[in-house]
Image: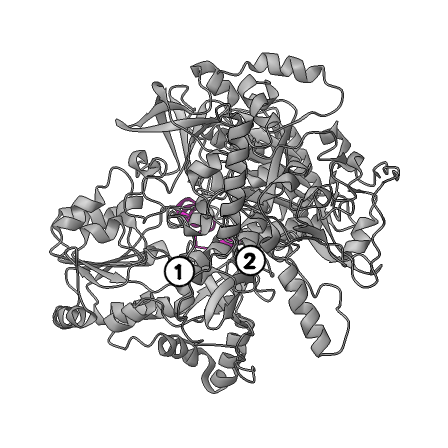
Amino acid sequence: MTINLEALRARLAKEEGPRLWRSLEELADVPEVRRYVEAEFPDIVQASHIDRRTLLRLMSASLALGGLAACNGSETGKHPPLLSQSHNMPGYVPGVPVTIATSLPLNGYGRGVLVKAQEGRPVKIEGNPLHPASLGATDVFAQAEILSLYDPDRSNAPVQGGAPRSWEELTNFIRPVRNELVVDEGRGLHVLMPPTSSPTLHRLVGQARQLFPHAQWHEFSPIDDGNRQAAARAVFGRDVELVYDLTQADAIVTLGGDLFAEEAGHIRYAAGYQARRRAKERELPHLFAVETRPSLVGARADERIPLRPRDFEAFAEALAAALDAGTAPSGSHPAIPRLADALRRAGSRSLLVAGREQPTHVHALALAINARLGAFGKTLRAIEPLRITASEIRTLADLAEAIQAGQVSRLVILGGNPVYTAPADIDLGALVRRVPLSLHLGQHRDETAAVCQWHIPESHPLESWGDLRAFDGTVGLRQPATTRLKPGLSAEEFLGLMAGQNTDGRGLVQAAWREAWGDAFDERWARSLEDGVIEGSAAPTVDVAIQSSWKPEPAAPASSAGMDVLFAPDPSVWDGFYANNGWLQELPKPLTKQVWGNAALVAPETAEIFGLSSGDAIDLSIDGRVVRAPVWVLPGHAPGAVTLTLGYGRQSAGRIGNGIGFDAYAIRPSDARWFAKGEIRRAGEKIPVISTQQNHSLQGGDIVRVVAPDEALAQQAVQPSIYPEWPYKDHAWGMAIDLDACIGCNACMIACQAENNIAIVGPEEVAKGREMHWLRVDRYYAGDPVSPETYFQPVPCMHCETAPCEVVCPVNATVHSSEGLNDMVYNRCIGTRTCSNNCPYKVRRFNFVDYQGTDFSAPSDAMNPQVTVRDRGVMEKCTFCVQRIGAARANARVEDRRLSDGEVMTACQQSCPTQAIVFGDINDPGSAVSRLKQSPRNYALLGALNTKPRTTYLARVEDPKENG
């Protein structure tokens, strides 16, 4: 049904105090949603009526089968031996995990991680505290690399014309081809590769170009920074990259993009912003987000300003004019005076960030404004480009022209999947088929491999040697955490082969750094391997100044015709590379909570105009190309625009990713890769959209609390209880979650899944409300649906002192431990689910089927051996990572000492970029968690129920004018 916005606004106006809501349908009190929310198990509501006798027969059969299922064993495979480990380890001890420092790529930049390997088998990834891009935290993509490593659909043999070939046959084929290229000096050879910051790859490319001087090198990524680079050349006359320092910023304005999710340094930037908010000696910073689609940075902003893509140039011009950094504007906006005043008052402590999708003109004005305010050297700095610049390399369009002109006789595609991600007007698949010899190096036999004559398996980053620069230029070495699970070559090894060297990845990386370090190589190499970063390798600051010849030209007046179409990377599958990763497919997107697919995101006003509701299908056309997509009505989205996320509609992703969602690349033009004009029309059908936003809905007031700076919450009175007091002679574990720090990035959710062997259940089971995540991140709205406030709240098990789940279990499967944990004894559980019925927080998950034995299941090699794998008929939930508590306790016992504060970190805590989650011993008054629980912002979720949860929350802090 279509939502009536005026009716919703009238209802909200009558509310006393803020009203939290999770969806427009819930706010409108749609009967179907009301019935869904009121049902503890929504799928049961849909079942037909069953009489008492039949029900008893079914229960007795279920109990018997539940006991049988609990006896099922699991297969174990032979795991590879450990290949690399830190240089100072005395030796490998069986059963003791080994931690290996390495770097993982995302869009060509590195993120430092620590890989925990058990018996030579990587099982968990954490952030490297020494690496500037992670600071000990991770994002969802880094966590999911464990599952990608064990992906059964990874390519495992060379392929020629669709037929498997041996490595010997490949070698025999390549050797004469390479010899011919050497003689011809590379004539007719074109190489296409994604952008990279790897010093070793840059060195090998340089050597190959010397060997093949007539070869042409092309670079392509669907998530590119071309507009930023063009703006820097126009304004400064040189190529530079920007590094932001949010710890110094008092006023921040973002124009599109997502500073906390999509930038190369997004983990660091989120951490820096929260560190700035925690600086007690300074007033809270002001964050303004001007954006088309709601984002993580917009959800955290003090003020969000929805804006159509076509209006950004005029908005940036008006802001520049207000700050004396540009010419007369072509228009204005009511928010301009507020933003200009905040930036002006902050002076050099101001920062303006333009998202990568913005036109070159907007990026240029952003550079001019930052320079005018004196921000360079304070809140941002310029560094030399970390990737090969446009002057040294050609584009995908250049390659297409060369193929059409018959100038390409040999084509080598090193990584990526350009046939799938190429703009719609470049039929790269057909062009590649015209090349006499084409070769593709990739991890999967994907859409690009299907059109190339030869496909070569590419090694996973956790299997190979290399190096990568972080967003600030710091180099992290990439070393294998295991032997190669499947035969393959890395890009470094393939280029080494082309350059006439060898395929020894370690030797190629060492050769690059031996040149740089000279006699100090051995010592620096060993130290850099152990640390995961090369000390002192951050890029130095370069001085920039606005060229006198640069004059900002006024933007052309925005047309009023058509619908604005914005393309964006997907928060779950990025550009489509992670489409075959079940953890990410089932991870609810931060704002829509959609899983297993994508949707066309539109504003409530747009939906009202076109008579659309979530799930309605639309046909969206750009330049005559049409794609059909389901609509998702997203509060806060800019009207007059539609957002399409990339990465879905795959045909050769693998058993998980094939056929999921629609392909936005099919209508993405090459001349408007981020923003295009299009048309939409109703298709007259429904396309199911699976979202978890109504699953496990909490009922009650004061779920998310908000306070002004220095304001204290009213403390709840202690209520009497019939439960006995639990004595804790040693430790008493507890958790505090700071809602002022949570940005809703979902890193904690997927870290919990990787650590605790949480099953992937598939789209049909999620649609029934049966997802298995132990930790969920609830997203709430408050205020006008057109531009509401957005709040995130991670919800694990509360580990209640007076736990209502414990007293109702008929077999004592859920019990209270001597250290305050609410434990689950799996082999006692008979699946009555009375504990889940009695949990007001809805954090318990039941294995309705054997989720570890379905087509969606993670491979057994990806399982953490320290955590039990649960079978059908068993209830499970958050354990506060009890296995980590036990391991730390054992280490302390061996060393004859007490556990120290911070020694035990839960998986969710360790992954969090903003340190929103703190865990520890509340019996220790000096522990970090004890101090947070003494905060005047501390409160218990649903505290009126007197469950006395061990997990408590710190209220979000907002300026009174935003909280009004």
How far across and how far down the image is residue 272, in percent?
Answer: 64, 52
**801 horizontally vs 781: left or right:** right
Q: Residue furthest bottom?
A: 519
The answer to whether residue 109 shows anywhere in this view is no
Residues 357 and 639: in front is 639
**658 horizontally vs 198: left or right:** left
Residues 860 and 528: in front is 860
Amino acid at the residue labelled 1:
Tyr
Q: Residues within 10 Å of mark 2 (few under 14, many from 20)?
A: many
Disc assigned to residue 135: none
Numbered marks: total: 2
**192 horizontally vs 556: left or right:** left
How far across and how far down the image is residue 763, in percent?
Answer: 43, 38
Magenta-colored stretch includes residue 230: yes
Which of the marked residues, 2 or 1, is nearer the chain's N terminus?
A: 1
Residues 560 and 263: in front is 263
Q: Residue at x 49, y 63 (%)?
A: 123
Amino acid at the residue labelled 2:
Glu
Magenta-colored stretch includes residue 433: no
Name the residue beneath numbered marker 1: 150
How far across and how far down the image is residue 416, in percent?
Answer: 32, 54
Q: Residue at x 57, y 45 (%)?
A: 745
Query: Eyeballing the image, is 360 above or below 439?
Result: above
Q: Residues within 10 Å of mark 1 (few under 14, many from 20)?
A: some
Disc assigned to residue 755: 2
In the rendered structure, which segment of residues is drawn in magenta? 225-245
